[in-house]
Image (spheres, rainbow, N blue to C red):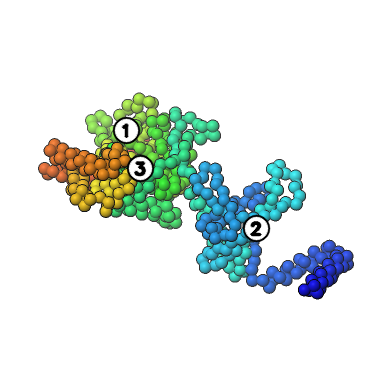
Amino acid sequence: MKEYWTSLASLLGVLAFCQSLIQSIFPPELRFAFLKFFNRIFHLFSSYCYFDITEIDGVNTNELYNAVQLYLSSSVSIAGNRLSLTRAVNSSSITFGLSNNDSIVDTFDNVTVLWEHVVTQRQTQTFAWRPLPEEKRGFTLRIKKRDKALILTSYLDYIMERASEIRRKNQDRLLYTNSRGGSLDSRGHPWESVPFKHPSTFETLAMDPIKKQKIMDDLKDFAEGQMFYQKTGRAWKRGYLLYGPPGTGKSSMIAAMANHLGYDIYDLELTEVHSNSELRKLLMKTSSKSIIVIEDIDCSINLTNRKKSSGSNATRSYYDLETRPGGTGSGEESGNGNTITLSGLLNFTDGLWSCCGSERIFVFTTNHIEKLDPALLRSGRMDMHIHMSYCDFPSLKILLRNYLGYEEEDVEEDVLKEMERVVEKAEMTPADVSEALIKNRRDKERAVRELLEDLKSRGEGNVKDGKLRGQSGNLTELEIVEEEEKRAIDSQNEEDDSDEEEIEVEDNICKD
């Protein structure tokens, strides 16, 4: 054993002597040229190529570096041996990252790549207006030469898209409202924001599951339909009209849509907007991937149906009808001096200015669809009409699960059948049912018992008073909805014909 260590020491001594001899004989320039030539020969015969992505490009931050860092913070990085944990400002989640000089393998389109996080100390600090970090950080991407075309075209673009999606999901969503009187905040923005913490989701939303799935599929097709909208030449936006009695979950539906898509919400208060130009400016300051909401549009400002003029008013032009304060042609201003016209609101949702951003959703809510102007209801403005109705049996089971933790098998079969029998007659809104369950949530059996009594009492009262839909030859709820929409569409067709005639009259007057 002693001889082994003696021979090893001798070998190390010989190597040290050779190294010192080479350094004394060959100048540094020659050694550097030889090393460079050796590396070139090595890379020539190697099947791999390498790409460096530094954190700072000159004096600017490299966006690709941040994108790679976010991309590797997804689930793929959990397989790493050593990870760093971070939580950004305004973020509700913790992200993973590669530690210094650690590496990880990723796969894209059946191609395997190797990422290495390289961290070295910066040797000299050159003069700069913005001091550089003491550590020099970057990622090194190792790929096979035959995969170079695929990686540089598709893989890096995929990383940028995934990073943008991860960044949006990690950030807290915001709820915006327009500033009072059109004033600007300290940054010159007309919108004020607070963190959006509404917990509503489609899973907890009290609605028929089949109807919910249809809405979720429509939202998914919209969010993933960028190429479709570009191909068809349509603006990447969609409109939803939520209507029904108060307490049926219209606001909860909006929150569920925002949480499902990860979009911010802009709650537009029309009474604080004084003109059409101010309305356009508010639209320009909204971001993409957002939901623009106007709640209770029939109560916000005076935007009633346009009626055919009669008598001496028959020759008034289309422009006279729509440029009057309130958009009704009545000439009466609203009490707060609001001069938004129906034409301005229509252009806001479906005009040229509505296309100044992408991936936007417009949501209008109302308790009385029959009060809305038919022009607001047509496709392209409100593409999907969603009727928020009274609580039915599937919705009732969802509320029992939400508030009491009861599944269908946890409730006695006789009680469940009795609820199914009376829930349609009771015509209770999800808000009414929720309040009954919250009141007795500490005693679950009592909560179910009192809820059943409320359902029976209201159902019997509706039958006795003749208020129940579908009795004595009255229309059912679905037939009422269909009839209202049919009347709105017919009225819109009549208005379109009337508008064309009025435009022709105006053109003739201008020619004369």
Residue 235 visible to the viewer: no
Residue 462 on image: x %, y % = 16, 39
Q: CA distance from mark 2 to mark 3?
A: 47 Å
Mark 2: secondary structure: loop
Q: Residue at x 36, y 29 (%)?
A: 325
The kind of residue on which mark 1 rests is: Cys
SS at mark 1 in the image? helix
Residue at figure coordinates x 27%, y 39% from the top left:
436
The amino acid marked with disc number 3 is Ser
Quarter of the image with the C terminus is: top left
**Residue 358 seen anywhere in this rendered image of the structure:** yes
Element marked by disc 3? helix
Return the residue at label 2: 101
Between 265 and 503, the one nearer to me in the picture: 265
Screen quadrant of the N terminus: bottom right
Q: CA distance from mark 3 to mark 1?
A: 19 Å
Would you say the residues marked 2 and 3 are in contact, meaning their CB atoms lie under 8 Å apart? no
Crowd rating for badge 1 (residues with CA inside 10 Å; few <14, some 14–19, many 20+) = some
Q: What residue would you read off at disc 1?
A: 299
- In this rendering, position of residue 343 left or right of residue 461: right
Nearer-N-terminus badge (1/2): 2
* Residue at which label 3 appears: 252
Residue at left offset 41%, top offset 30%: 272
